[in-house]
Amino acid sequence: MIIVTLVICAILAFYFYVYLSNRVVANTLTILAVAGVMVSIFFIVKNDHDYYGTHNVTETKTQRIYSASPSKNLPMMLYQSIGTADKHRVYVYKTSASTKKTNHTRAKVTTSNTVKRTTGHNRIVTTKTYREYKNSTAKFWFGLADNGHQYVKEHNTIYINKNWTVLSAPQAKKLQKLASSKSYQAKQKAAATAYVKKAVMAAMMKNPSMTAAQQKQVTQQAAAAYQAQAMQQLIKQVKTE
C-alpha cells in the first residue's frame, strides 16, 4: 500500500500544481502531496534497508542423526571446511541407521554450527530465523515488498555421544588409508597378539582355575580393548599431522 500511496501522492501533486487555478490552494495542496511522496519514499527505503515493520521469529526443528562412518564400531561426525580459514564447516551425517545416503548442513555464510557432547540421543537441533510482519497494519502497508517470512539465518546445534569421533573429510580418508595398509595391519596383529596373551596370563594368575569359556571371554575383551586403543592412537596421529 505504501507504493500505491506514493503513486497517488505523485499524481495529486502534479494535478494540484497544474490544474488548480487558485494558486494558494494549489500550492498548499501540492506541498501536502509532495510531503506525502517524501514520507512514502522515507518509509519505503526504511523498510528495504532496515526492514521497518518486520521482526525476527524463529522456528526450531529436531532431527535424530546417525554416524556417516561405514564402521559401526567407530561412529563419526564428518565435516568439510568451506574456505581455507576453517571459519565455516559443513557437517555430514545420516538421518537413518539403515540408509547409505548422507545429509549435510547448509554450505552458506548464514549457517552456523555448534557441536556438543551428550549422553542422550544423537541429534541436530536447527533453529531458523525469519523476518515476519509485526502486525496486520505493517503487512497492509508493506505487503507488496514481500518481506514476510524472509529467511535470515540458521544455527545448528549438533549433539553427539562421547564415543563419536569428529574428523574432517580428508582426515577420515587418511585414517581409512592408514588402517587398511598391509604394514599397519601386520604390525597391529603382532602387537594385539602380545597384548591379548599378556592379558590372559594376568587373568590366569589371579584365577588359576579359569575355565576355557572364561579364558575365551578374557581373550575377546582384551582384543576389543586393544583394537579400540590402537584406533584412538591412530586417530590422534591423523589429527596432529
Image: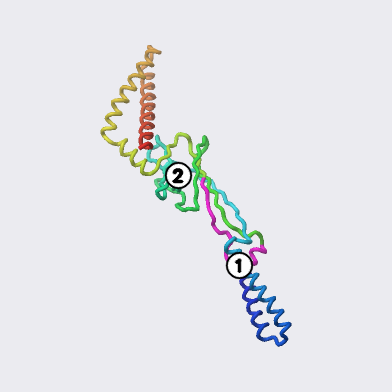
Residue 107 drawn at (x, y percent): 45, 52
Q: Is residue 238 left or right of residue 14?
A: left
Residue at (60% x, 55% y) in the render: 56
Q: In this rendering, does residue 1 appear at all?
A: no
Q: Residues within 10 Å of mark 1 (few under 14, many from 20)?
A: many
159 relative to 130, above or below: above
Q: Which mark is residue 96?
A: 2
* Residue range highlighted in magenta: 136-156
Amino acid tagged 1: Ile
Q: Is residue 134 left or right of residue 101?
A: right
Residue 150 drawn at (x, y percent): 56, 59
Residue 157 drawn at (x, y percent): 52, 44
Q: Secondary structure at mark 2?
A: loop
Q: In this rendering, does residue 87 appear at all?
A: yes
Image depth: mark 1 or mark 2 in front:
1
In the rendered image, the residue lying farthest to the bottom is 21
163 relative to 14, above or below: above
Q: Which of pointers 1 and 2 lies earlier in the amino acid sequence? A: 1
Residue at (32% x, 20% y) in the render: 197
Residue at (50% x, 53% y) in the render: 110
Q: Secondary structure at mark 1?
A: helix
Q: Which mark is residue 44?
A: 1
Q: Is residue 187 left or right of residue 25?
A: left
Distance of label 1 from label 2 (alpha carbons): 47 Å
